[in-house]
Amino acid sequence: MESGVLVGFEYEQEVKLRCISCGLEYEPNPRLTRCPRCGGLLDVEVKPSTELSWSLWSSRKPGVWRYRELLPAAKGSTPVSMGEGATPLVRLGRLAERIGAERVYVKHEGQNPTGSFKDRGMTVAVTLAKAAGARAVVVASTGNTAASVSAYAARAGLKSIVVVPQGKTALGKLGQSILYGADVVEIQGSFDDALSAVMKAVEEDYRLYPLNSFNPWRLEGQKTLAYEIAESLGDAPDWVIVPVGNAGNISAIWKGFRELYQHGLISRLPRMAGVQAEGAAPLARAWERGLNRPLFVDRPETIATAIRIGHPVNWPKALTAVRESRGVFVKVSDDEIMWAQIALARLEGIGVEPASAASIAGLRKLLSKEVISPDEIVVAVLTGHSLKDPEAMLRAPTRRILARNPEDAVSKVLGLVEIELGKDPTPSTRQLEEVCTNT
Ligand code: AN7
């Protein structure tokens, strides 16, 4: 490791790098992604040289780089960018009413270039990796990180290698990595197995640059999600709800809000709610028992394959985020996730993959437990697009009718007009149980 460390890497702003476990400070080198001394997570701090204000930013094009004073950008580098961020914040109507909430917004991260929030981090980390002379990038992924890395590496002219769980990676994501030209290693094992393989490979070969979310440089890009929410609403909401897998995103979003608060750009901080799937809930299960450490899961299982993660590497940061913000972790069942995915689609016209629907399922649960009250302002982060997981979409119960010829199609259409007009479009518990037991 030592031999490869660049010294005197120059940034646009002052940048600090510190280990959150042993507290040691390092030269802020993008090549450092874990603490060389104790292996702990590193934290980046960007100290802007100018005074920050919303008007400084609002005069620029929207997106991740609008907030460049708070991003670690190498001096003189051109961002590897394709318009990431600047995703819509959409107020819910029919679904909010259905679950008994007055002011719910969703941040539709599926509208990023590769269809997930990962692009926010990749634009920053790939730009740095390129400036630091990396030639090849590598990730373990449940699918979205792989898709995003493959695209940004392609744009930067870097080689990409992705390691994904065989048979458990949604088709759209796998297809993206293949199209963008990554080399794909399909591991017979879980995401957690893939991640330990990547960590070992990176130690063996210095030419490989890791882009998983233990890489603190990547998380710097993801914190812009908080900046956009605050900019859209004019302040922080009461709650921000985030699906949690490897636990990087919730940590990054919390960091973003904290920075805005420190710079006097918001007047209060939100509470963070982290949502996990029941079969992959190391943090939510620990939270219920009041523990300080996750209850790791060796064989995670859920239809929300994006968050099918049992050993979240960023757990110390995520636990701090939820604690400091007086938030919660909560778990939801696969049935509840499916209901939320279909309800969001059929009551609001918003298509997300199952993992993203977990944030809506979590909101519904927290409302029913009276942790969140109906009049609070809530932002649920919808992390990935529905097109990512075509198989999940096809499982939603509906009528699919075969027409043998055009005349038959006419009669089938006419026969459908009157059927149950105005009926509740969301699936019943029985329908969901059928779907879940057949998958
Ligand atoms: C749609 O792609 O871990 O808690 O390897 O794709 O920051 O891990 C994906 C994670 C939520 C959880 N929603 O975010 C990967 C991967 C979607 C995701 C998460 C993921 P983290």
Image (tube, helix red, strand yellow):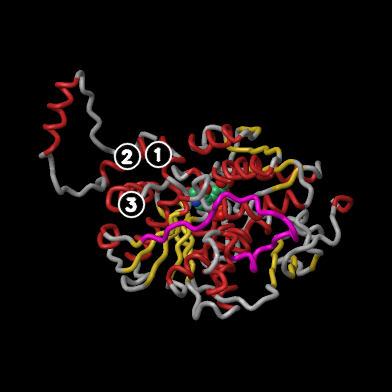
Which of the 4 image quadrants contains residue 400? top left
Q: Residues within 10 Å of mark 3 (few under 14, many from 20)?
A: many
Instruction: From the image, tell me which residue sits under label 1.
Output: 392
**Residue drawn at x 48%, y 72% as measured from the top left:** 270
Image quarter (top left, top right, bottom left or bottom right) of the C terminus: top left
Q: Nearer the viewer, residue 29 or 112?
A: 112
Is-magenta flag for residue 79?
Answer: yes
Proximity of marks 3 and 1: CB atoms separated by less than 8 Å: no
How far apart are labels 2 and 1 at the CA level?
7 Å
Q: Which residue is mark 3?
A: 344
User: Are the residues tagged 3 and 2 within 8 Å (C-beta)?
Assistant: no
Q: Main secondary structure of the magenta part?
A: loop
User: What is the C-alpha distance between the residues marked 3 and 2?
Assistant: 12 Å
Q: Is residue 4 above or below residue 260?
A: above
Note whether 351 is above or below 73 in the view shown: above
| Residue shown at 44% from the left, 46% from the top | 385
Q: Which residues are magenta?
A: 67-90
Identify the element where label 1 is drawn. helix
